[in-house]
Every structure is written in structure tokens, then in C-alpha cells.
Amino acid sequence: MIDWRNPPKLFIPGPVHVVPDVLQQLARPTLGHRLKEYSQLHEEVVNMLKKILFTEQNVFLSTSSASGMWEACIRNCVQKDETVLCTMCGAFSDKFANVTLSCGRKVEELKVEWGKPITPELIDQKMSTGKYPILTLVHNETSTGLTNPIYEISEMMKKKYPEVLVFVDSVSGMVGMPLHFDQLGWDVVFASVQKAFSIPPGFAVAVVSKRALEKSKSVPERGYYFDFQEFAKSAAKNETPTTPSIPHVMALHYQCTKLVNEGIENVWKRHKQMADFVRGWGKDAGFELLPELKYASNTLSTFKNTRNIVVGDVNKALRAKHNTVFGNGYSKLKDVTFRIAHMGDTTMADLKELTGWISEEIK
Ligand SMILES: Cc1ncc(COP(=O)(O)O)c(C=O)c1O
């Protein structure tokens, strides 16, 4: 039997810990999704998202996890005869490329070793061939704890390849670190809510540029559930095309209100402070970060297991003694790295407790 009165405290990089007042939002009375009350809720959420993501373009709410948005941007905005330049620097950016292939589109891979960043120079070398009308990029690679230099990449892209559409997975970046959508000149950016929004999983947010939406009109067989044209028609009425997960929209309203009240720049600062603390702890405890410090993520830290701890055993002990769990390495990085999430409603006090407990187990 699951003991619901004593759930494990999560420091894995998603889903992250959700605080009780957010959980309560998911238990509000249900609204009909074509009632004016829902439209009001939807409109307010979209307006707050526009503010915190610095955009005046389209914001769509999707009842899916973020993987659906990988598929959505490819199926809506890429013609069958176009080749997508997929940048790959870890497990999730690799999956973005695989999804592109599984949607029947052509892919050119730009791969770097896991833990290394995608740089403007690398993209420029490929783009200069003139063969790629689309670029995919991950903002924050959750497997390696690395943030790509998105502002530098965007500057280069806007200057040299302004006609190229740019799709960005910001699943573990959005609201935890700077993201000025319109200034970056991106075309689609998306995230799921179980990361820095600190909401239970099952919902995603996407910003879609005017030109991406325009292009989607000419792309055949966009499918049904994630058709951007249908999203846009419904968004004009502050609705979604199909019945949304209304409890998630309520929770998103609550969390966006908090983010707006705190001030998004302060939210980014708070994430940086948590990241600095965890990095400092790791260094003192004898662990090296996987990425170079310059590219280290502010929402999670991936450490090389330089002390050869048995990650599973440490986690087992933390579960038994403190009902707490942190992240093992992802995929091929399992056991050779481990990950600590520091995003959303996680606090510095939580992190002090967690790192103290880990130190206790490995001393
Ligand atoms: C960077 C990144 N992209 C995509 C995904 C997939 O998102 P979801 O699990 O919400 O479908 C994840 C999940 O952890 C992720 O970290």
C-alpha cells in the first residue's frame, strides 16, 4: 500500500517536489471547458505566461507531457522534403532528433560529447551549407545538467540565418533561467510543468511564433491532437481544442501568479543561488561537475561520481531514514554521475537538509 500521508520528498530532476498549496489547486471544483469561467482562467494564465516568457506571440496550453511538443513542432512546421539540423548533447536532445525521424522527417545530426555544449560556431559551420531550414536545440539538457549558450546562439542565428526556424526544448529551463522568447527570435519553445513550474506532471506549455504558425498552414498531415491551427483557433476564444486537464490549468494559474508576484528576474536569481549552494557542496564533498562551470545548469546539477559512491545504496539509505530521493545519472550516465534538482518550489533549507544527509552517508 502507498502511504499517501508520507510521500517521498523528490530531488530528482522531474517530477520535482510539489508543495501542499499547489496540490490543493488540483482539487478545486471542476469547470466546464466551454464556460466563461474557464475562458477567464485560460486567458489569465496565458497573459501571465506571456509576461514571464517575454512574448507577445502565441501561447498554447497542451494536455500532454512535453514529449508531445517535440512531435507537435515537427509535424506542424517541417515539410517532408526539408532537413532538420538537430543539435545533440545529451539524452533529451538526442530524443528530439529521434522524434524528428519518427515523424518521417530528414535529420542532420550535430553531435557533441555528453557534457559539452552546443556552440554558435558549431551551428554556424553546418548552417553555412545552406541545407537546413530548421534547427532544434535543447535549452537545458537534463541528463548532463548543462545549459546551452542560447543567447549567443540566437545572436548568431538572427544575424546570419534569420530565415531558419528554431525549435527549443526548454523543459527543465523554462522559468528557472532567463528566456526572452521574442528577443531570442525563436519559433517554438516548450516545457512540461513538472520541472521548474513545480506542478504534478501531465501538462505542457508552448510558445509558437507567428511565422511558425503561418508556416504550419502549408504543412499537410499535421495530425489531430497537436494541430497548431486548431490550437490557434481555440486560443482566440481562450480555450483549447479538446478537453484540457482543467486542474492543471488551475495549478498553473496559481504558480504563474506566484512567479509574477515574485518577479521573474528574482526567480532566476533564486535558482542561481540554489545552484551555487549545491555546486559548492559538491566541490567540498569531492565531486566534479560534469559540464564546465560556465555551462552548469541553474535548475539541476549533474556531478561526476568521482568518489565512486554507490548511488543506489545512498538513495536507499536516504529513503529509509528521511523518505527522500535524489537522481541517479540518466541512461548511459547512470552510476557514473548523479543529479540533484534545485528548481521550482524547492528551498535552500531543503537543499541544506538533503546535502547534509548525503554527506552523512558517504563520509
Ligand atoms: C530536456 C527534456 N526534454 C524533454 C523531456 C520529456 O518531457 P516529458 O517527460 O514531460 O514528456 C524531458 C523529461 O525529463 C527533459 O528533461
Image: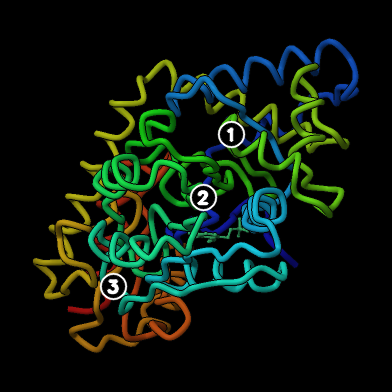
The quarter of the picture where the C terminus appears is bottom left
> Would you place residue 290 above or below residue 166 in this image?
below
Task: Tell me the amino acid under the disc marked 2.
Answer: Phe
Quarter-of-image position of residue 62:
top right
Task: Tell me the amino acid under the disc marked 3.
Answer: Gly
The quarter of the picture where the N terminus appears is bottom right
Question: Which mark lies nearer to you, 1 or 3?
Answer: 1
The tag earlier along the polypeptide, 2 or 1, is 2
Q: Of residues 272 and 155, which is closer to you in this image?
A: 155
Q: Is residue 331 left or right of residue 83?
A: left
| Residue that appears at 82% across and 35% down | 230
Q: What residue is pinned by disc 2?
A: 167
The tag earlier along the polypeptide, 1 or 3, is 3
Q: Is residue 248 left or right of residue 16?
A: right
Task: Tell me the amino acid under the disc marked 1.
Answer: Arg
Q: Of residues 132 and 303, which is closer to you in this image?
A: 132
Question: Which mark lies nearer to you, 2 or 1?
Answer: 1
Circle 3 — which element? loop
Residue 251 lies, in percent from the top left, at: 64, 31
| Residue that appears at 66% across and 35% down | 213
Q: Is residue 363 left or right of residue 83?
A: left
Label 1 environment density (alpha carbons within 10 Å; few <14, some 14–19, many ≥20): some
Q: CA distance from mark 2 to mark 3?
A: 21 Å
| Residue that appears at 54% across and 63% down | 84
Q: What residue is pinned by disc 1?
A: 211
Q: What residue is pinned by disc 3?
A: 115
The tag earlier along the polypeptide, 2 or 3, is 3
| Residue that appears at 23% across and 79% down | 362
